Amino acid sequence: MMIEEMKLQLIYRAYYPISITLSLITNILLLFIMKTTRSALLKDMQYYLLNTAICEILVSASTFLAQCRPVANKTTLAVFCYGPCKHFGPNTCFFMFALVQASVVAASFSILLSFYYRYRLLQVHVKNARSHKKTIAIFSLLPTSMLGLLLQTMVPFVVYIPPFTYVLVSQFTGHSSLYAEYLLNTLGSFTAFINPLLTFYYVLPYRRALCKRVFKYFPSVSEEGTDITTYPAAANFHRGNTAITKV
């Protein structure tokens, strides 16, 4: 058991720096793309994406600083912290553990709010006859956008429900697994860089901006398949005013 625990500690000591690096790069890049990309359809939704990105950065930072390993039994829940917070005492470690849980919940609910916002936005514009032009533009973005949000919404449930179920089972039975103990805190940091990647892939204006501004020096990365049908915001809705590009 001691040898297995030492191996796991070595693995996770290498994992956490990689995780926070990927999370900071992807989320800061997403914030940059959001800042420099102008899209009338994404103007309001950017506030939800901004909130989610900030929560994900907080998740990755708190997870790295804490590096918690919860050990549950029938009566108590012990938390061992191997991160930098251990140098500042147990109170700091307890605060970081609570911050991890709070930021994970905040990020999950932020994604759910984004999903609900897009759903309500679609309903409003479908019912409003005066926004016919904008409705068609929304429908052009809908398939990939909703699929991406659906995946982002399912990630927290797939990632967080099994670990919390394991904690409840451990407290009920009094038995725990060494691998599950180390895995509990890892899954939260995993979503911190998966969600911005899903946003880049499924929100087509951001994917196009990423290809143009970041990957333009890489010939293997193409914009093929990222263009969509766009409609000038200041023009009246006529077929002659549409700018149709290849899909």
Image (cartoon, grey):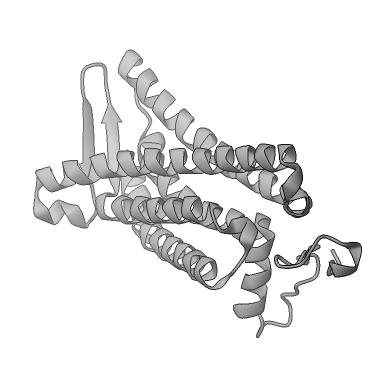
- Residue drawn at the location 37% of the way across and 48% of the way down: 8
Residue 93 lies, in percent from the top left, at: 17, 46
Q: Quadrant of the N terminus?
A: top left
Tell me: residue 44, above or below residue 79: below
In this orientation, does residue 72 appear?
A: yes
- Name the residue furthest top: 172
Residue 149 place in picture, x, y as percent: 61, 45
Looking at this rendering, what residue extends furthest in the right direction?
Answer: 240
Depth order, front residue of 186/181: 186
Question: In x, y percent, where is residue 127?
Answer: 72, 37
Q: Describe residue 153's horizontal placement relative to residue 135 as left or right.
A: left
Is residue 215 among what the camera can see?
A: no
- Is residue 226 left or right of 218 when viewed as pictured? right
Residue at image position (36%, 63%) is 17
Tell how many labels: 0
Quadrant for residue 226, please give it: bottom right
Q: Is residue 133 above or below residue 150?
A: below
Q: Residue at x 29, y 52 (%)?
A: 62
On the image, which quarter does residue 121 sit in?
top right
In this rendering, the answer to whether 116 lies above or below 235 is above
Q: Is residue 143 left or right of residue 102?
A: right
Q: Quadrant of the C terminus?
A: bottom right
Q: Quadrant of residue 88?
A: bottom left
* Residue drawn at x 12%, y 56% as measured from the top left: 87
Nearer to me, 96 or 225:
225
Closer to the camera in the image, 97 or 38: 38
